């Protein structure tokens, strides 16, 4: 028998039986974990409301040794709320769709249960905190989160130097397959020519330059979002279902 505690973000929930749920949590130390929360769908549940998507929680898990390596699911038997980001997200449709895409991205980049993913966890907590606060436009927060998630997982795009030969920028062409902007000599079929402003915006989102990002025009933000979505889909090998709602 193993009892362990960790803090994490609830990514999604699934109904189980008449009163239980399976919760998927991205934790600080143990990566992505699926666990059974018993009785949380009952109206008298003490912590059912804390185990909703977007919630940042301190959770205690109870598991047999074999359950820690994927045979069966551990039980979630204690929950304390750290931050209820959902209250600042679900009431606004634009924030909600952006936040849902962030949760799906975090789950897709942590496809091995129990494997530590500290950087992805910290990115998600910071992204949800920023999104809930309303400090920046939701789509910009989402694109910044997507770009940084790609970076911490080894797929950082280049928006200045040529991704193939390293020629200093600015470079005009962007190739998803090549890993970012490319020079005229390295240009490959299928490359696009984004505006300079869009590339500057994406570079600012990747590095956290919010002064530049907040001053962008809508058309450059839309073009940048299209590039981010295409780049993400290339590396995940299929798109995010939730991005369709963000685009609408």
Image (cartoon, grey):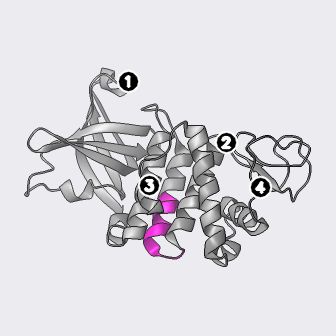
Picture quadrant where residue 114 is located: top left
Classify the position of the C terminus by image quarter.
bottom left
Cα separation, mark 1 vs mark 4, equals 40 Å
Q: Nearer the viewer, mark 4 or mark 2?
A: 4
Left or right of 214? Residue 191 is: right
In front: label 1 or label 4: 4
Mark 1 touches mark 4? (CB < 8 Å)? no
* Badge 3 or badge 2: first in the primary sequence: 2
Q: Is residue 83 above or below residue 72?
A: below
How far apart are the alpha carbons under marks 4 and 2? 13 Å
Question: Which residue is label 3 attached to?
Answer: 244
- The residue where tag 1 is placed is 69
- Check disc 2 and report the residue beneath it: 155
Query: In this image, 5 relative to 127: left or right?
Result: left
* Crowd band around label 1 with a 10 angstrom C-alpha radius: few (<14), some (14–19), many (20+): few
Decide: is 198 above or below 171. Answer: below
Query: In front: 22, or 172?
Result: 172
Q: CA distance from mark 1 to mark 3?
A: 34 Å
Residue 225 located within the stretch drawn in magenta: no
Residue at left offset 57%, top offset 53%: 146
* Residue at 77%, 57% in the rendered image: 193
Q: Earlier in the sequence, mark 2 or mark 1?
A: 1
What residue did someone put label 4 on?
Answer: 159
């Amino acid at each position: 028998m193993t009892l362990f505690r960790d803090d994490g973000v609830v990514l999604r929930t699934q109904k189980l039986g008449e009163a239980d749920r399976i919760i998927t949590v991205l934790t600080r130390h143990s990566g992505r974990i699926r666990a059974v929360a018993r009785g949380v769908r009952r109206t008298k549940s003490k912590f059912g409301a804390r185990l909703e998507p977007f919630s940042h929680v301190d959770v205690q898990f109870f598991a047999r040794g074999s359950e820690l390596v994927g045979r069966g699911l551990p039980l979630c038997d204690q929950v304390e709320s750290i931050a209820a980001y959902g209250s600042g997200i679900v009431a606004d449709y634009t924030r909600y769709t952006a936040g849902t895409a962030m949760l799906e991205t975090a789950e897709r980049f942590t496809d091995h249960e129990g494997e530590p993913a500290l950087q992805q966890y910290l990115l998600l907590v910071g992204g949800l905190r920023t999104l809930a606060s309303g400090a920046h436009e939701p789509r910009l927060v989402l694109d910044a989160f997507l770009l940084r998630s790609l970076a911490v997982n080894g797929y950082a795009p280049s928006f200045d130097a040529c991704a193939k030969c390293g020629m200093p920028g600015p470079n005009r062409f962007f190739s998803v397959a090549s890993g970012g902007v490319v020079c005229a000599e390295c240009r490959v079929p299928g490359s696009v020519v984004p505006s300079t402003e869009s590339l500057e915006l994406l570079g600012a989102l990747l590095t956290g330059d919010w002064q530049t990002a907040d001053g962008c025009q809508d058309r450059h933000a839309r073009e940048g979002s299209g590039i981010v979505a295409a780049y993400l889909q290339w590396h995940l090998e299929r798109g995010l279902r939730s991005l369709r709602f963000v685009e609408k």
